């Protein structure tokens, strides 16, 4: 199979140790997804006729849990293979595989698998959800499996409870930011918490002036990486990103606030919770709104051996931090169970 997208990794894409940032890979994954999904949703132009066809773009609404199976390094070529694997009436599923090719040695390694869900939106009238052209399935079993995944992700989006909603509201975030000062104890939430602020510009947006989901995920991974690096003071890399639901589209000109904080540590990994809040200043709206929320998992690596290092235990200081640590432990154990099941049932 020929690659859908292909790009050589440069020093700008990596950290000081040569590991390509997870956010760079997430951005490329979303680029592949938005291209193939938008192309499919406009595929009936000829059968409908130019006058009857409503041009549309696709908006990322959900990314399933994404594991970083192997690291990618400077000089390797990222090859992305994208495929539409299910179509519902108003949404479609795209699966993307990422390979790292060493063109000097002629070898390739599978580094990522990702599943993304998109909604087709009309360009004019704006924001009107369109119907997705139905794909052709190999057989009935494949179609039923697609519908099963669709129902599962829909139920998960509607689910309330553990991990289903942000555990920190905006007012609490502001109080935490204001309370931070020098001299905080290491390996605590307050010590490692980090923030980024970004103004959504033209290069961040699609043709209808909304920020690409991949751009948002790239910054989310960046603030999570800063948080993990502050905590560990070593080379840290993204191990996984839990399922992400995009609650609100982000318009061009909005101020984007990214906040990361540690919530749980195991012996060799740490969980970082990331919030994305926005202000639509161009529209005169100064109230911050929650746009995205997700959990990232990072590991610490030695140099130059790249062996996984132990991670110091997170020192919880409040009842809220203790509660979030317990919830993080539950998520950690759920990830381990799912990973063990997937490895045991894999036929790749």
Image (spheres, rainbow, N blue to C red):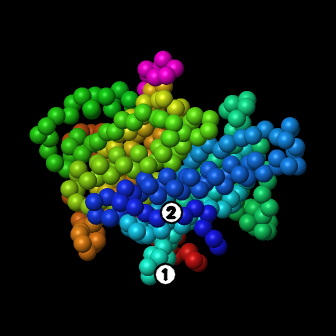
Could you tell me which residue is drawn at 52 percent across and 56 percent down? Answer: 28
Q: Earlier in the sequence, mark 2 or mark 1?
A: 2
Q: Quadrant of the N terminus?
A: bottom right
Q: Picture quarter containing residue 207?
A: top right
Q: What is the x, y in percent for residue 301?
A: 27, 66
Could you tell me which residue is drawn at 16 percent across and 34 percent down? Answer: 181
Q: Which residues, given as a range, are shown in magenta?
A: 281-289
Q: What is the x, y in percent for residue 114?
A: 54, 60
Q: Picture quarter containing residue 323?
A: top left
Q: Which residue occupies the foreground of this view, 250 or 114? A: 250
Question: Measured along the vertical axis of the image, is residue 287 above or below residue 97?
Answer: above
Quickly name the residue at label 1: 106
| Farthest-out residue, left | 183
| Farthest-out residue, top | 284
179 horizontally vs 200: left or right: left
Q: Secondary structure at mark 1?
A: loop
Q: Which residue occupies the foreground of this view, 255 or 142? A: 255
Could you tell me which residue is drawn at 33 percent across and 32 percent down? Answer: 173
Q: Neighbour class for label 2 at 10 Å: few (<14), some, many (≥20)?
A: few
Quickly name the residue at label 2: 7
269 horizontally vs 2: left or right: left
Q: Which residue occupies the foreground of this view, 287 or 212? A: 212
Q: What is the x, y in percent for residue 89?
A: 76, 46
């Amino acid at each position: 199979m020929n690659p859908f997208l292909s790009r050589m990794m440069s020093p700008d894409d990596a950290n000081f140790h040569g590991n390509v940032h997870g956010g760079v890979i997430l951005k490329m994954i979303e680029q592949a997804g938005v291209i193939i999904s938008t192309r499919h949703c406009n595929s009936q132009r000829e059968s409908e006729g130019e006058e009857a066809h409503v041009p549309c773009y696709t908006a990322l609404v959900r990314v399933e849990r994404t594991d970083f199976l192997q690291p990618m390094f400077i000089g390797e070529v990222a090859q992305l293979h994208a495929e539409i694997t299910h179509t519902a009436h108003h949404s479609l599923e795209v699966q993307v595989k990422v390979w790292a090719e060493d063109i000097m040695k002629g070898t390739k390694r599978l580094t990522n698998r990702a599943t993304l869900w998109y909604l087709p939106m009309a360009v004019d009238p704006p924001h009107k959800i369109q119907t997705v052209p139905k794909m052709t399935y190999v057989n009935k079993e494949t179609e039923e499996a697609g519908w099963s995944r669709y129902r599962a992700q829909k139920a998960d989006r509607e689910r309330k409870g553990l991990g289903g909603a942000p555990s920190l509201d905006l007012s609490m975030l502001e109080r935490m930011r204001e309370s931070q000062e020098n001299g905080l104890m290491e390996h605590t939430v307050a010590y490692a918490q980090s923030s980024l602020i970004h103004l959504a510009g033209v290069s961040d947006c699609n043709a209808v002036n909304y920020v690409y989901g991949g751009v948002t995920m790239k910054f989310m991974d960046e603030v999570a990486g800063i948080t993990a690096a502050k905590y560990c003071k070593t080379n840290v890399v993204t191990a996984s990103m839990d399922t992400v639901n995009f609650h609100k589209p982000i318009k061009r000109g909005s101020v984007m606030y990214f906040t990361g904080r540690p919530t749980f540590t195991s012996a060799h990994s740490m969980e970082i919770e990331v919030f994305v809040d926005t202000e639509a200043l161009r529209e005169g709206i100064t109230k911050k709104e929650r746009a995205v929320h997700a959990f990232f998992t990072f590991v610490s690596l030695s140099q130059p051996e790249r062996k996984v290092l132990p991670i110091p235990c997170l020192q919880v200081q409040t009842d809220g931090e203790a509660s979030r640590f317990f919830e993080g432990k539950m998520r950690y154990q759920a990830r381990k169970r799912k990973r063990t099941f997937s490895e045991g049932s894999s036929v790749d």
